[in-house]
């Protein structure tokens, strides 16, 4: 028996979606205690520049999942500045296959030379708890219930608006939690994210059924907001 707190499922966004919107703030905004994997012994074999392995970390045992994001930050000669951020495509034991965010496998510039690379510093942070919390609130707002036939997530015609709303909610909450002063650009970013979130929230219509016309759409104006 597990004492894991209850989390809503399914969710409408992934860490990869958060990365696309957060850009360079992804690693900074992710709580350090939500680390799925970390090491300095990452290795890319000769001729396999998209597969990272580690002798000290079993990614599968650690619970690393597709669509999570890995940061490659060393050696600095290969990963200068803030490093390279890639999406996890698949996991197998102590190896993970990577790809460029929102791209198919083997598309784009490989993260390392074709000859391979060793002593790679890596970390995988996740926003899973924040994503689950945002999705729970969205389900309450729009009357989505996994226990009611034809009102569960699988019955929603298009999840793209809910995905964006989830991403913006998570980012706004994280900027708010981490903001310590008016210095820098986070105050401006927080206001921009809030405005985008409010715009998306105003326009979202949850359409039901395989064609989106099985019943009247749910909006924030015809569903009771509850917690």
Image (cartoon, rainbow, N blue to C red):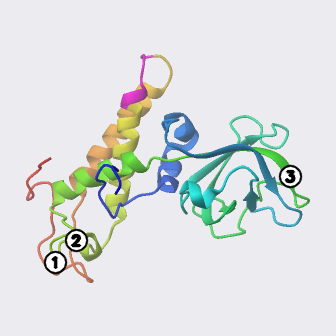
Q: Distance between the residues labelled 3 and 2?
A: 46 Å
Q: How far apart are marks 2 and 1 (CA)?
A: 6 Å
Circle nearer the N terminus (3, 2): 3
- Residue 93 lies within the magenta run: no
Secondary structure of the residue carrying tag 3 is: strand
Residue 201 higher or lower than 32, as above or below: below
Secondary structure of the residue carrying tag 2 is: loop
Residue at 54% in and 34% down: 28
Give residue 191's position: percent from left, percent from top.
36, 32
Residue 91 higher or lower than 20, as above or below: below
Q: Which quadrant of the view contains residue 99?
A: bottom right
Q: Which quadrant of the view contains residue 97?
A: bottom right
Label 3 crowd bin: few (<14), some (14–19), many (20+), radius 10 Å: some
Circle nearer the N terminus (1, 3): 3
Task: From the viewer's side, name the closer residue of 177 and 189.
Answer: 177
Most extreme residue toward the right is 115
Residue at the disc numbered 3: 117
Residue range (magenta): 176-182
Label 1 crowd bin: few (<14), some (14–19), many (20+), radius 10 Å: few
- Residue 180 lies within the magenta run: yes
Residue at the disc numbered 2: 152
Give residue 208's position: percent from left, percent from top.
20, 75
Q: How far apart are marks 1 and 3 (CA)?
A: 51 Å
Whether label 2 touches label 1, CB < 8 Å:
yes
Residue 71 higher or lower than 138, as above or below: above
Residue at the disc numbered 1: 149
Secondary structure of the residue carrying tag 1 is: loop
Image position of 46 (left or right of 131): right
Whether label 3 touches label 2, CB < 8 Å:
no
Residue at 32% in and 71% down: 158
């Amino acid at each position: 028996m597990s004492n894991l707190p209850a989390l809503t499922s399914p969710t409408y966004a992934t860490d990869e979606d958060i990365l696309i919107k957060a850009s360079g703030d992804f690693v900074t905004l992710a709580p350090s205690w939500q680390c799925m994997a970390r090491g300095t012994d990452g290795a890319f074999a000769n001729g396999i520049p998209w597969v990272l392995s580690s002798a000290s970390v079993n990614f599968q045992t650690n619970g690393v999942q597709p669509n999570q994001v890995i940061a490659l930050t060393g050696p600095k000669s290969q990963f200068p500045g803030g490093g390279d951020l890639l999406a996890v495509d698949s996991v197998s034991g102590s190896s993970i296959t990577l790809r460029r965010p929102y791209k198919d496998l083997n598309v784009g510039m490989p993260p390392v030379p074709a000859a391979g690379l060793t002593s790679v510093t890596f970390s995988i942070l996740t926003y899973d708890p924040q994503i689950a919390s945002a999705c729970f609130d969205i389900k309450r707002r729009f009357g989505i219930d996994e226990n009611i036939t034809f009102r569960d997530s699988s019955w929603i015609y298009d999840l793209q608006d809910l995905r964006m709303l989830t991403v913006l909610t998570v980012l706004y909450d994280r900027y708010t939690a981490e903001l310590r002063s008016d210095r820098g650009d986070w105050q401006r970013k927080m206001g921009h994210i809030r405005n985008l979130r409010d715009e998306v929230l105003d326009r979202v219509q949850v359409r039901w059924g395989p064609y989106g016309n099985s019943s009247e759409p749910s909006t924030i104006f015809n569903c009771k907001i509850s917690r």
